[in-house]
Amino acid sequence: MRATRGSLTAVWAALLLLLLAACTGAPRPAGPTGGPSGGPPPSAGGPPPSGTAPGTRTGPYGAPARIPSAPGLPGWAHSLGFAADGSGFVLLVQCVTDEARPTNGFCRQQVAALDRGARSWALRSTPLPEIPPSRGVSAGLTVLGPGRALIEDGGGEEPERTWFTRDGGRSWRAVDRRTVGTTPLIPAGAVLTTACVAPARATPEECARERLVVISPEDGRRRALARVPALGAHPRPAAVPEPDGSWWVSGTDPLTGRTGLAVSRDAGRSWSPARLTGTAGRPGHGAVVAVGPDAVYAAELGELDAGEPVKNPLRALHRSVDGGRTFTRMWTTGPDAEPRSLLGLPVPGPGGRVRVDAEPRAYASEDGGRTFGATESGSSWVRRTGIGLLREAGDRCVYATTRDGVRWSEFRLACEDPVGGGA
């Protein structure tokens, strides 16, 4: 068969590319597993986060995202959250008081947004009304993917109201908070939570049975997850996935009556048990999971059997080196040895490193959680976001984020007037 001019041109172009690669050290074609020459596949971390320097390694356990500081934002900040692309939202509350006429005081509720790749935060419109200082803040914000968020306000004696944005907070529309229909999976950007089934619309304290529901990034509506793990009447889900894409739910193991875990690796389509060996005999408060570069940590929560009572008690820390399929109990909380509490999530690092933020200080381990030593004073709350673990200091002004549990990137928000202004 005679070759055409076009096919000959393609052959010469391919040869030229191979020669250039050999001379310049350019990456070679991917091997069978997706990486160069059959090596590990490249990181699936998506686009570089906001402010990441060119050439910085990104991915699930790469360099931390660089978030711009905005200490001059008005009031104090809460409900900070980020999407995987580095965009984010935060609620702001700025109170004005009048000592001579207290009824003249008010608190203004605002939203600040960080667009993808932006170098600064921007104040955006908000559906939240001004409130009297005596009422207290009841609103919360949930990030649902790039440029998307849900604001929920009210409850108790106040009417429940919910608004959704899909354009970075430039506009908001009211949505119904009730759970409608079902969904077979948890889409990207969604949040996993619970809703009361019986009795209907009961408060958390009065609810006898809850179910897993998904808050959709498409419209901000709640839909029941079609397939759920068997973990008792009060499952406790992680709101967002871990860096490896796994979703975790804790509750009561139906076989033992003790703290149980389940994991989904296919966005909630199916669930597998992940039993913790050596859990406490009496029911606790469930468990929280953090997946690190080379280990998975599950922190068992619940009231302690000995010693002084503490807030946010930590019963035990379990470790897995096979992706969460089997766990080993590493740390058992006693009457004296610290840590005895946990604020949020443990922070896993490489090579057996793990950090536990407790009260009144943090503790670090170099041997997978067998032993701990005290670190700096002070306490921070740690939770998972789309850009990694987020650490929030007690003064609600200083934040830091990490992907690998070792390198942290600090930033500040709303630091000038954290307790409100005067008239």
Image (spheres, rainbow, N blue to C red):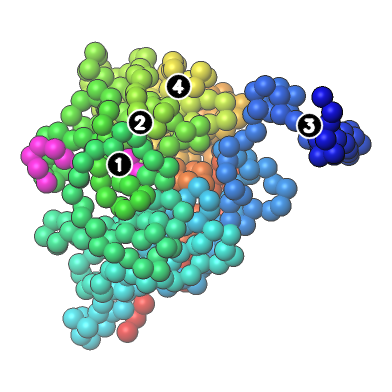
The tag earlier along the polypeptide, 3 or 4, is 3
**Of residues 3 and 386, which is closer to you in this image?**
3
The secondary element bearing badge 1 is classed as: strand
Q: Decide: marks 4, 1 in contact (CB < 8 A)?
A: no
Give the CA separation, mark 2 to mark 3.
36 Å
Does residue 195 belong to the magenta stretch? yes
Q: Is residue 121 visible?
A: yes
Task: Give the residue type at disc 3.
Answer: Arg
Q: Decide: marks 1, 2 in contact (CB < 8 A)?
A: yes
Q: Which residue is mark 4?
A: 324
Residue 249 in the image: state x and y as whole percent.
33, 30
Q: Which residue is mark 1?
A: 214
Q: Residues within 10 Å of mark 1 (few under 14, many from 20)?
A: many
Q: Is residue 139 visible?
A: no
Task: Give the residue type at disc 1.
Answer: Val
Task: Give the residue type at disc 2.
Answer: Gly
Q: Which residue is mark 2?
A: 268
Residue drawn at the location 31% of the way across and 28% of the way down? 250
The tag earlier along the polypeptide, 2 or 3, is 3
Q: Which residue is mark 3?
A: 28
Q: Residues within 10 Å of mark 4 (few under 14, many from 20)?
A: many
Residue extent of the magenta highlight: 191-201
